[in-house]
Amino acid sequence: MTDVLIVGAGPTGLTLACDLARRGLAVRIVDKSPRYPRSSRSKGPNPRSLEVLEDLGVVDAVLAAGAPPLPMRKYRDGVPVAETDPYATSSPTPDAPYDRGRLIAQWRLEEILRDRLAEYGVRVETGTEVVGLTDDGASVTVALADGSTTGARFVVGCDGAHSRVRKLLGVPFDGETDEEQMMVCGDVEITPGVLDRGVWHQWFDEDGAVMLCPVPGTRTGWWFQAGPERDANGRPLAPSLDGFGRLFARHTRLPAGHLTEASLLSTYRVNVRMADRYRVGRTFLAGDAAHVHAIAGGLGMNTGIQDAFNLGWKLAQVLRGRADPGLLDTYEEERLPVAAWTLDLTSERLRETLAAIRKPGGGLDTAVTPSTSGLDRGYRWSSLARPGGHGGPRSGDRAPDAPCTEAATGAPTRLFRAFAGPHITLLGFGAGAERALGEATTTHGDAVRAFRLYGAEPPEPGAPTAGREALHDRQGHARAAYGIDRDTVVVVRPDNHVGLIADADDHDALRRYLDALDRPREPDSMRVADMVDGTRKG
């Protein structure tokens, strides 16, 4: 029996599979499609998703395969009227290394995640369709379309807006579909040299619109979006290569023959829907299976990736017996409100964008706001959140990054490198944090990675360091990012959100919080572990 069966091998399912596999769990990921898709679909990860992908060890591959967001060139009557760059005034900061997302075809992002998953010995099982679920309270028996069955301790439906898993669970998917607001979409090939591939072209006219964005890593590939063709009665026509060519010629004033090929011919209707719960027994929903919304702001795939990152560590802790099963209830508690907020934000951005494109110079840049970066989303309402903080982030917030150096070698590093991996991170500021760090590493072993952060001063001679690592925060970026003005301990959850900010001498608060995330190791079992691996942690 597998630990977790993931249904759906898009970015959400693959992110979850990678996170669980690196924690040593038995994972299966299945998809009903007989082969891997080659469609571009989503335009890429936003800054918060890039942080997740960095933690999973794939961000360098994503950055290499993709491209930064492009300036947007707007046209009226075939003539350029404006060009804007939504990110012209933004730049990385010490606490946020990614100030913008990355353009990358979805098929290429999925390929990178599949390659990472294969490094853990797990491969997507294509052509495998789930048709039934039976939960006996201890595991889930899953019926497959070929007549076979398989068992899993937990199942996660990451199978999209038409989720079979959600339907089998009987979970309502309430909301609305706006039949009037629709567009046709696809991947197209355009004759090289006809259009500048250094910009995102947007033609807005009284009778419709065409938007063309170059697909990174291709010579002739473009994302195509347009208002649909309509018949004499105003009914939308089904998308086709000829139809795309006519729309292209009408708005660009270029010959239709330059659009030489079209794939992923699809019609998009604005759907705003959300599951009323994310868990039924031992089965969970994530990504589009749990929520869909307007495409303004590009948050669909990103919300799913962040669902998966929230759920993965919680499943792992419960499956290992390291946390109470009630920890799993915090997945819905934390992520469902984020989905509701996302539905509201994207609907509002869509309204603003539709109003903007009716005016000369208006375009899709209206959909880009600081909130679409994902960096301001946290869980302050969560039962995992605790009081505390000194003017910086609070419990539940995204944990900021900061540049620092390794005390032992002087090599430059960052807090994100300290966070990366399947562990809880402790940051100790000031000499008063030593005792708290030592107790935590002794009690929780390798579930915790503890760092003592020094300022300009060197580590104290003879300072205890067993089980801890030392970092220099010479420029004070870490202290500034976390609002530190006294001896303090910060707990960073495995999904890189702040768990607790406590005064260094508040040992009870730290002990209680860590025990909620990771049960204390039994002394006898720790001694056995020490004899096996020859080390003493803490």
Image (cartoon, rainbow, N blue to C red):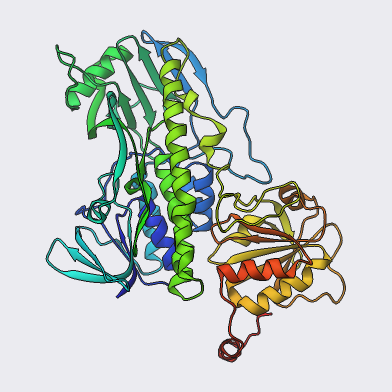
Q: Is residue 341 above or below residue 55?
A: above
Residue 42 at x, y percent in the picture: 37, 39
| Quarter of the image where the C terminus is located | bottom right
Choose top left, top right, bottom left or bottom right for residue 133. Answer: bottom left
Taking the spot 54% from the left edge, 35% from the top edge, the residue there is 371
Total number of numbered discs in the rendering:
0
172 and 199: which is toward the camera? 172
387 and 271: which is toward the camera? 387
Give the left or right position of residue 505, taking residue 20 as reference: right
Give the left or right position of residue 209, taking residue 355 as reference: left
- In the rendered image, is residue 198 in sight? no
Give the left or right position of residue 405, taking residue 293 as reference: right
Taking the spot 12% from the left edge, 66% from the top edge, the residue there is 147
Residue 63 at x, y percent in the picture: 49, 46
- In the rendered image, is residue 70 in sight? yes
Residue 382 at x, y percent in the picture: 55, 53
